[in-house]
Image (spheres, rainbow, N blue to C red):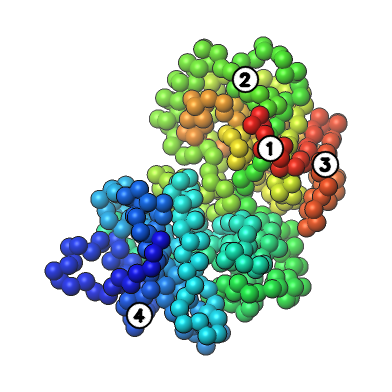
């Protein structure tokens, strides 16, 4: 990237046709906020993304915002991206779908950074941060929504700061823009500490954002990031932890899934048993499909693509609820919506007697959240493997169309595994062929309805057994947890185990 100062003011009449309409529309919103900064400092991609460059954002404008004393808003730098939306309308980057829908991905990113005393120009590191997020969006086609969180695990400015993760919210000043190529919203990046990210995961992003707005040094009303902040909001006001705990207890968690290092083993049969030809991941070795099953999968793919286009494996780290989005892009993980059609002709169902689930430590620490914040509130939770096409979804008992029953609590249907334990139903998906993966991405999750088959005491027992995973201290690995009466085993293992090619 390189820094330039392109004119963002009104284009001369003779140049109007050369100024991309989508770009001009966003500049118009910037001029509304900053009429006295017609030529802001910009970071621009030297080689544009549509010409083969690595940076998806064409420009990032940087403005000096004087804040608002009446609202206790401090002076800061305001960064605004250009490129996640459709700037050109000629299909060079985004497919033009009309004026009524979203423009490109439907949003641009913004970031508000506290201005340090004596700073005369904005730091440029936020531009690279925004480019990194944009690369993820372009490569995965996963969109962001207000309330989403991003686990970054590194100081945002590569310093020693405690601000190492991000939440996303609507920009408090910028209003949605209707461009000739569709609607553009503005999502603001908010830097947070690890403890604040964990609270957002265990409760919900919107709740945490409201708490941050109430603490001046943690962001204030406009959620301005201060990279020098050394205390969490819980250090500043210990009573805020009670707000989070109460929110989890009464509302549960809105986090419905995370990217993870995870695998599952079918302990019902020895690995050398070759009777079953389904594409189920038995330990680390996937089964090969027979020619008959392959043909069935191809037919199911053709049918599946006709009746449903919603992705079965939505993006990770979303807390979205109730926002309508077109299906041309992958939505972020939805916590409550789940209607799926799984072709029964894919392969026959096989009952399993015992299942072993394996997670790395970071994924394992979210198991108490899964139980307490999701399942006890009748919701599901998904672990999507970053090392392959495996996903493990925990859902509440009582799944419409489920093939796992009380009599046969563990069952696999082609690439889908369902594990039914007291209060729990683990719904696992893996794909070892391109055909299976395509069929699954043409479907979404099975509709769930709440059922309580056993007592609450059993869930409390599991929470008690797993309580050490919920601490902030490093747990000595490996750790194993077993419920023999339910034939369920969970292991928390070092990351190196999942880095093996066989996993």
Pointer 4 and pointer 2: residues touching (CB < 8 Å)? Answer: no
Pick whichever of labels 2 and 3 is earlier in the sequence. Answer: 2
Q: Is residue 180 above or below residue 94?
A: below
Pointer 2 and pointer 3: residues touching (CB < 8 Å)? Answer: no
Mark 2, other Cα within 10 Å: few <14 / some 14–19 / many ≥20: some
* Residue 151 visible to the viewer: yes
Say which residue label 1 marks: 498
Label 2 to label 3: alpha-carbon separation: 28 Å
Q: Which mark is residue 287?
A: 2
Pick whichever of labels 1 and 3 is earlier in the sequence. Answer: 3
Pick whichever of labels 3 and 4 is earlier in the sequence. Answer: 4
Of labels 4 and 2, the one closer to you: 4
Mark 3, other Cα within 10 Å: few <14 / some 14–19 / many ≥20: some
Pointer 2 and pointer 1: residues touching (CB < 8 Å)? Answer: no
Of labels 1 and 3, the one closer to you: 1
Residue at 17 percent across and 67 percent down: it is: 15
For mark 3, give the secondary structure: strand
Q: Which quarter of the image is occupied by the C terminus? A: top right
Mark 1, other Cα within 10 Å: few <14 / some 14–19 / many ≥20: many
Pointer 3 and pointer 4: residues touching (CB < 8 Å)? Answer: no
Residue at 42 percent across and 30 percent down: it is: 305
Pick whichever of labels 2 and 1 is earlier in the sequence. Answer: 2
Mark 4, other Cα within 10 Å: few <14 / some 14–19 / many ≥20: some
Say which residue label 4 marks: 37
Residue 132 pos. (x, y %): 49, 56
Say which residue label 3 marks: 479
Residue 359 pos. (x, y %): 72, 40
Of labels 2 and 1, the one closer to you: 1
Pick whichever of labels 4 and 2 is earlier in the sequence. Answer: 4
Label 4 to label 2: alpha-carbon separation: 62 Å
């Amino acid at each position: 990237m390189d820094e330039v100062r392109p004119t963002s003011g009104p284009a001369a009449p003779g140049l109007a046709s050369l100024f991309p309409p989508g770009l001009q529309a966003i500049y118009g919103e910037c001029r509304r906020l900053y009429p006295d900064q017609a030529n802001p400092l910009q970071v621009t991609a030297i080689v544009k993304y549509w010409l083969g460059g690595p940076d998806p954002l064409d420009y990032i404008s940087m403005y000096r915002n004087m804040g608002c004393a009446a609202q206790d808003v401090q002076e800061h730098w305001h960064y605004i991206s250009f490129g996640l939306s459709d700037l050109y309308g000629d299909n060079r980057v985004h497919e033009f779908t009309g004026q009524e829908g979203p423009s490109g991905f439907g949003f641009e990113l913004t970031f508000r950074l506290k201005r340090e005393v004596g700073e005369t120009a904005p730091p440029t590191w936020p531009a690279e941060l925004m480019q990194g997020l944009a690369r993820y969006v372009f490569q995965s086609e996963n969109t962001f929504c207000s309330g989403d969180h991003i686990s970054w695990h590194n100081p945002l400015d590569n310093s020693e700061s405690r601000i190492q993760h991000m939440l996303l919210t609507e920009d408090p000043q910028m209003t949605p823009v209707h461009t000739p190529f569709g609607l553009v919203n503005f999502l603001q990046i908010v830097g947070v500490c690890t403890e604040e990210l964990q609270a957002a995961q265990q409760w919900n992003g919107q709740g945490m954002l409201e708490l941050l707005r109430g603490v001046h040094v943690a962001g204030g009303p406009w959620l301005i990031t201060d990279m020098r902040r050394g205390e969490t909001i819980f250090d500043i006001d210990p009573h805020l932890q009670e707000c989070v705990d109460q929110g989890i207890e009464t509302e549960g968690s809105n986090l419905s899934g995370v990217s993870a290092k995870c695998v599952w083993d079918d302990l019902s049969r020895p690995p050398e048993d070759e009777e079953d030809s389904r594409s189920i991941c038995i330990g680390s070795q996937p089964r090969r499909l027979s020619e008959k099953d392959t043909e069935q999968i191809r037919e199911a793919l053709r049918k599946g693509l006709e009746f449903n286009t919603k992705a079965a494996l939505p993006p990770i780290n979303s807390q979205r609820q109730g926002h309508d989005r077109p299906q041309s892009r992958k939505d972020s993980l939805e916590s409550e919506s789940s209607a799926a059609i799984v072709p029964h002709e894919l392969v026959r169902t096989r009952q399993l007697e015992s299942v072993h689930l394996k997670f790395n430590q970071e994924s394992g620490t979210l198991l108490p959240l899964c139980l307490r914040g999701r399942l006890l509130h009748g919701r599901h939770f998904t672990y999507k493997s970053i090392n392959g096409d495996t996903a493990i979804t925990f859902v509440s008992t009582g799944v419409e169309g489920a093939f796992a029953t009380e009599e046969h609590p563990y069952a696999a249907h082609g690439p889908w595994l369902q594990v039914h334990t007291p209060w729990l139903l683990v719904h696992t998906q893996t794909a070892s062929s391109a055909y299976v993966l395509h069929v699954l991405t043409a479907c979404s999750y099975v509709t769930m309805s709440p059922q309580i088959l056993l007592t609450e005491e059993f869930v409390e027992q599991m929470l008690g057994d797993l309580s050490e995973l919920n601490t902030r201290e490093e747990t000595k690995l490996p750790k194993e947890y077993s419920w023999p009466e339910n034939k369920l085993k969970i292991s928390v293992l070092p990351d190196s185990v999942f880095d093996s090619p066989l996993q």
